[in-house]
Image (cartoon, helix red, strand yellow):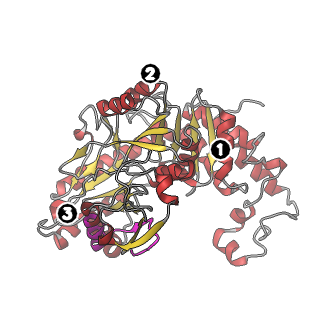
Amino acid sequence: MEKLSQERAPIYEALDEFRKKRVVPFDVPGHKRGRGNPELAELLGEKCISMDVNSMKPLDNLCHPVSVIRQAEELAAEAFGAAHAFLMVGGTTSAVQSMILSVVKQGEKIILPRNIHRSVIGALVLCGAIPVYVNPDGNDRLGIPLGMRRADVEKAIRENPDAKAVLVNNPTYYGVCSDLKAIVRLAHENNMLCLADEAHGTHFYFGENLPVSAMAAGADMAAVSMHKSGGSLTQSSMLLAGPAVQEGYVRQVINLTQTTSGSYLLLSSLDISRRNLALRGKEAFAQVVRLAEYAREEINAIGGYYAFSRELCNGDSIYDFDVTKLSIHTLDIGLAGIEVYDLLRDEYDIQIEFGDLGNILAYISIGDRYREIERLVSALSELRRRYSRSKAGLMRQEYIEPDVVVSPQAAFYADKESLPLRDAVGRVCSEFVMSYPPGIPVLAPGERVTEEIVEHIVYAKEKGCSLTGAEDPAIERLNVLKDQLIKVKSF
């Protein structure tokens, strides 16, 4: 197969060529280029709906790519500095889960921080692997979990020499980066693979003076959320792999859960976005950095808010900071982050990424301009003037160390009963509870319910956090294991 330049977008080019041929469709999808669903065609537009097609020889097949999708994946691998790249249409959740399912099996251990996305624990539920948690460092002022300390990772490896892999967030939702190169080295010296959840790190591969990317640090696999900072359509993602990973096996694992009807709208958006970043990413992300730095300076000048950045770096648990992340501490104006989130949307028509108990995150990307930044700064200034109050009585968001009793898989599939939230204290949870975003579980299957966790959930509900994951959507009840006699870890 010929080697293509980064100026090419083979999936998009094949789609455009196919559209010009006016092929008569006697295949799926059933809307037949929109004719069968005029309202959908009107919503999406004729060009878009005409490109919503099924796999066929001229357009390749995502499950077993041999032509244009294969070329697009090779271009992506080259652009990201990986040995292999896989186009993912099930979001970065699918990429993270495929990554984990590729390296650990039932009963095997994986070392990871507890402030991971729900998709990681979901993968453990599916495969039966055992988590060995490294409790992240914390910041007392901000009340957020940070990265993993090198010594803590080293201790976990020393105590669990049979673990198969170490997983690292690069970066966290707030922009915090662990010492990835050192952790990769520790893993490899102990015959373990190193995996990275890079849902929020696409730009590390293309910008300058940003934290190191997983592939550049020598990691073995990375799940990269192209639709976040990379500009592709929502739900499109990349799974990257290094030379130590067997490409064919990873493809088999991906095909266990990913659709056999990959959306060409998503695939072409990945193809076009990779080309855009490869050709123009350096200057695009330089502009993102300028916007974020300008926003931080203006917001910190308001007073009361703290838009934090690289000044937090400590050489270990905050080894580096992603300066494109506009993370803002709000408690000093007497408002929880989720309250500021709601006020910005309801009063100022500004939708930010998320708010938690003490912070908000405004996502700055390649589509932003100074005028939007100025509108956000103005709204935050006015919001402080109108709504600020004493912060007495506000709860800081803090990392709660989990008490892991049984494996996530064992707990999720065990016999269970439903109890009122406060009656569940002391019992072992069999489901997830998390605020989404960011999707980091407060409780995960197999963890003991404590009074501190219940108070956190009640307070988060009162403040308006969107809590998800439990069978009871109101989170007034929790599913717990029926066996109350479990006192020690069963793995």
Mark 1–mark 3 Cα distance, whole angstroms, equals: 42 Å
Q: Which residues are magenta?
A: 455-474
**Residue at the image point whose x is 42% and y is 72% from the top:** 418
> From the viewer's perspective, is 469 left or right of 243?
left
Q: Earlier in the sequence, mark 1 or mark 2?
A: 2
Q: Which residue is mark 2?
A: 189
Mark 3–mark 2 Cα distance, whole angstroms, equals: 42 Å
- The amino acid at mark 3 is Met
- The amino acid at mark 2 is Glu
Residue 125 has which mark? none
The picture quadrant where one finds residue 322 is: top left
Q: Position of residue 32 (x, y in %)?
A: 80, 68
Q: Earlier in the sequence, mark 1 or mark 3?
A: 1
| Disc 3, SS | loop
Answer above or below: position of 325 versus 337. Answer: above
Residue density around tag 2, few if under 14, some if 14–19, many if 20 or more, within 10 Å: few
Q: Position of residue 391 (x, y in %)?
A: 13, 65
Q: Earlier in the sequence, mark 3 or mark 2?
A: 2
- The amino acid at mark 1 is Val
Q: Which residue is mark 1?
A: 253
The picture quadrant where one finds residue 69 is: top right
Residue 395 has which mark? 3
